[in-house]
Amino acid sequence: MPWAPSRSVTRPAIGIAIGVAALIEAARQGGFAPDWCYIEAVGAAWKASDGPHRVYLYMLKALAFIRMRLGDVDGGRAILGHLARLDQEDLVGSSVVSDLAEALP
C-alpha cells in the first residue's frame, strides 16, 4: 500500500514540508543559503530558465501562497516582497500571487 499521511496532517502542512525540503535541496545544488532572508539576486543564475535557482524561486512562490492560505498573510507577503527583489523580471509569475495578496485584509 502506498504511503498516505495520517488524517491529522493537513495538505497545506505537507505542502510546506515538501516546499522547505525543495528550498534546502535547491540551495545546496546552487551553492547559496537556504534561508530566503539572506539571499540577494546577484549573478545571471537567478535569470536562468532552469536549474536550482529557478526551482528555488518557484518554491518561494508556492510557500508564500500556502502561508497566506493558512492565514499567515503577513508571512506570505514578506516572502513575496523578497521574491520580487530576487526575480525583478517576474519570470516565475509571483506577481499573480502578489495581486491576490493585495486583495486580502
Image (tube, rainbow, N blue to C red):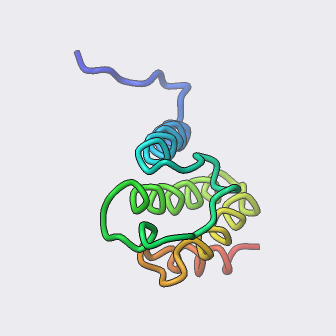
The one of 95 and 90 positioned closer to us in this rendering: 90
What residue lies at 56% left-to-right and 70% top-to-bottom?
42
Residue projecting furthest to the bottom: 89
What residue lies at 63% left-to-right and 55% top-to-bottom?
36
The one of 59 and 35 positioned closer to us in this rendering: 35
The one of 32 and 7 positioned closer to us in this rendering: 32
Residue 79: image quadrant is bottom right
Q: Quadrant of the C terminus?
A: bottom right
Q: Is residue 19 left or right of residue 48?
A: right
Residue 18 x, y percent position in the rendering: 46, 39
Q: Is residue 92 left or right of residue 3?
A: right
Residue 93 x, y percent position in the rendering: 44, 76
Residue 94 x, y percent position in the rendering: 51, 74
Residue 99 x, y percent position in the rendering: 59, 81
Q: Is residue 42 left or right of residue 25?
A: right
Residue 22: image quadrant is top left
Residue 58: image quadrant is bottom left
